[in-house]
Image: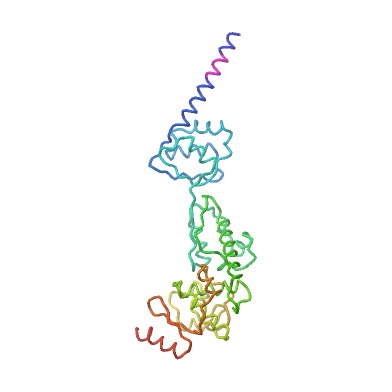
Amino acid sequence: MRFLNKLLVLILLAIFASAGWVIYFAKQPIGLPAPTHDLVLKHGSSLRGIAQQMVREGVLKEPWTFMFLIRAQGLAGEIKAGNYELRNGMTHYDLFMMITDGITSQRSITFIEGWTFRQVREALNRHEDIRHLSIPMTDEEILRQIGATETVAEGLFFPDSYFFDSGMSDLDILKRAYETMQRKLNAAWERRAAGLPYRTPYEALIMASIVEKETGRAGERPMIASVFLNRLKLGMRLQTDPTVIYGMGENFDGNLRKRDLQLDGEYNTYTRAGLPPTPIAMPGMAAIEAALHPARSNALYFVGKGDGSHAFSSTLNEHNRAVYRYQLRRN
């Protein structure tokens, strides 16, 4: 009986000693190799793998006590993948709470106005914090995966910065960008000016993409849109270089030649009337608003002044004089 009592006392002492050590450990600061440390926990990592990773990165001195701390709380399965910004002075308990509550430092990716979908895919593929599920997929397969009804991806994604936790898939980010474009385009469509020749929001999106590629000056976009809409109403061809360049794809070498303008194709607005079949890039909100709220003008032509701005003309004679003044005479 005495032996059992002694054994029980020893067991209780061991439990109290262990509990005391865990409490002491929990209150101790973690050791960092620098004032801050970026800890990246991958999806599917085990508790042991995570603890050993933190030892390798100098966050923990040994893995076992931290593993015991988490298991004692019954939260071994609650560790969240993501990016965590650790700072000197944090305790082991702070670290424990951070990774089980998922208090991550978010990552971001930015889609630029005027980018093509090919450029969007390249940016996603380069980003190290994104799970790359779309790499083997075609554009059409991607659209089906994100629930889009369209069959051509160009122009369907809103250019913006998207924040996410490490390990989010490229498909999730594309779905957000697609839904953002749908929401913003439809809201702008409901407020559109009267008398526009578009039959659908998608046609307005096509026009917005052309406006986006024609000028980088936000203040000129309503006038650029006005020129193209005036042409559409009169049955004139749009005759815009960016659509031709887009149609040439990888054949475009940076120099648009006269023969390129004469070679017929579905995106050649010099040889075909009306809008091209799809957008040619991602338009930003300013270009969408310009396409749906163009300036009121009689302008049918514009020419670059050489400083990024344009001269607008209502007649061909006036336009020819502007071409001579701003381009031929300068050359």
Q: Magenta segment, principal secondary structure? A: helix
Quadrant where the C terminus sits is bottom left
Residue at horizontal 45 percent and vertical 91 percent from the top: 317
Colouring: rainbow
Q: Is residue 15 left or right of residue 91?
A: right
Q: Is residue 61 left or right of residue 49?
A: left
Residue at horizontal 61 percent and vertical 65 percent from the top: 140
State yes or no: residue 79 in magenta: no
Query: In this orientation, which residue lies closer to the viewer: 2 or 209?
Result: 209
Range of magenta residues: 7-13
Residue at horizontal 44 percent and vertical 72 percent from the top: 217
Residue 211 percent across, percent down from the top left: 50, 74
Q: Quadrant of residue 254?
A: bottom left
Q: Quadrant of residue 75?
A: top right
Quadrant where the N terminus sits is top right
| Above or below, comparing residue 97 to residue 295 in the picture | above
Question: How many numbered discs sit on the rendered protein?
Answer: 0
